[in-house]
Amino acid sequence: MSESAHKTERVAVYPGSFDPVTLGHLDIITRASKQFDRLVVAVLNNKSKNPLFTVEERVELLQLVTADLPNVEVDSFRDLTANYVRIKGAQVIMRGIRSVTDFEYELQLASLNKKLNKDAETIFMMTDPKYSYLSSSVVKEIASFEGDVSELVPAEVEDALRRKVIEKKNGV
Ligand code: ADP
């Protein structure tokens, strides 16, 4: 058997709320996809967060904006990240860091995940400085006042936000 046949596939999971996906997330997804055989972008189905978009909508938007990245798969999960990563056969939990504030929270999360799944390593990727201020919350805030988010999110997300704002206004 050739040497490559013995090589295990390098799989990373990038978990998050993605409510909705921003250009900051997409930058991490694009860069991370180059470092692994497969990258699973996983939407956390967390009922307590009161999201703007449903899990299905968030998955669909992620699928649309990652369609040109062949080794990226989009999924959703309702479980501990450490368990989900084990089930997926992944070795890596991918996270993005924008600031010192992110670092403190992410360090806590990474330590917890290490305790729950010793086989998974959390790997951090630093934000592109041009997205360091960008979060889904900021995008939702701007969109709710019908502000311009065209430089913050992919065009498909901009359209979806516009539709959501109209829906909310009409009480749908
Ligand atoms: P969560 O609710 O788990 O923080 P998010 O969807 O907001 O989920 O973020 C998922 C991951 O992406 C986190 O690691 C977060 O730090 C990272 N992230 C969010 N926005 C950016 C950005 N602008 N640049 C780099 N990483 C980011």
Image: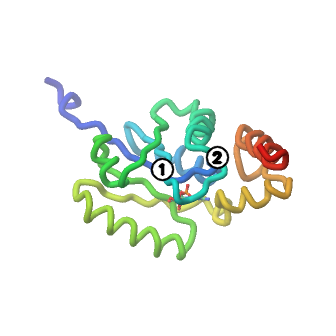
Indicate yes or no: mark 2 CB to ligand 1 under 8 Å.
no
Q: Look at 53% across and 76% down and name the residue there.
A: 100
Q: Look at 52% across and 54% down and name the residue there.
A: 47
Indicate yes or no: mark 1 CB to ligand 1 under 8 Å.
yes
SS at badge 1: strand
Amino acid type of the residue that numbered disc 1 sits on in the rendered structure: Leu
- Quadrant containing ligand 1 reads bottom right
Badge 2 is on which residue?
53
Q: How crowded is mark 2: few (under 14 residues within 10 Å), some or many (20 or more)?
A: some
Residue 87 found in image quarter? top left
Tell me where residue 74 appears, x and y as whole percent. 49, 37
Which of the labelled discs sits on residue 44, or is there none? 1
Q: Look at 52% across and 64% down and name the residue there.
A: 97
Q: Which residue, as the protein is rendered here, is positioned at the far top?
A: 1
Q: How crowded is mark 1: few (under 14 residues within 10 Å), some or many (20 or more)?
A: many
Q: On the picture, is 158 further left or further right than 119? A: right
- Nearest to the observer: residue 99 or residue 168: 168
143 vs 105: above or below: above
